[in-house]
Image (cartoon, helix red, strand yellow):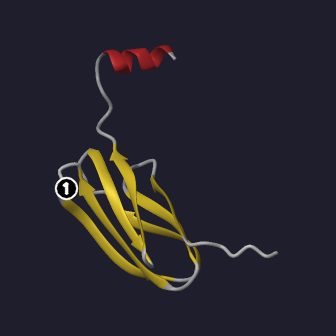
Amino acid sequence: MKRIPEAKIGALQLSPDALKATLHCFATQDCSLTVDLLDQQGRLFIQKKTSISKGAVAYEFSTDKLKPGTYNAWVNMGGLTAIRPLVIPGPPRKGITKWTSKLF
């Protein structure tokens, strides 16, 4: 029996330099993709809407203007909705953290 693939909203990954994020998903048909990135107070920081093709998709968007903090991406893809967390790291900490990092 052949298995029919299901549409899936996958992980949201931040690049090592924190300048862009990539959302991985799989669409069973051509559809629209909407990403709303909100902070913990519910304020909208990024809103993206695009059309994607059937199959595996890696959708990238810029995060270079975001301040350090925790965000939630509300993702809607062809009727599926998911929330994916995104953390923008702050600058390296000084003091004991920097000192202990030299030990290891």
Picture coordinates of residue 84, whole percent (x, y):
40, 55
Residue at figure coordinates x 17%, y 58% from the top left? 43
Residue with the mark numbered 1: 42
Residue situated furthest front in the rendering: 1
- Left or right: 79 with respect to 65? right
Using the rendered image of the protein, determine whether residue 65 is visible from the camera's viewpoint. Answer: no
- Left or right: 77 with respect to 93? right
Residue at figure coordinates x 46%, y 69% from the top left? 59
- Is the residue 21 above or below the residue 93 in the image? below
- Left or right: 24 with respect to 21? right
Image quarter (top left, top right, bottom left or bottom right) of the N terminus: bottom right
Q: What element carries label 1?
A: loop
Residue at figure coordinates x 30%, y 57% from the top left? 64
Picture coordinates of residue 87, whole percent (x, y):
35, 46
Q: In which image quadrant can residue 48 be found?
A: bottom left
Residue at figure coordinates x 55%, y 84% from the top left? 29
- Is the residue 99 above or below the residue 9 in the image? above
Picture coordinates of residue 31, whole percent (x, y):
47, 84
Picture coordinates of residue 74, whole percent (x, y):
34, 63
Mark 1 is on which residue type?
Gly
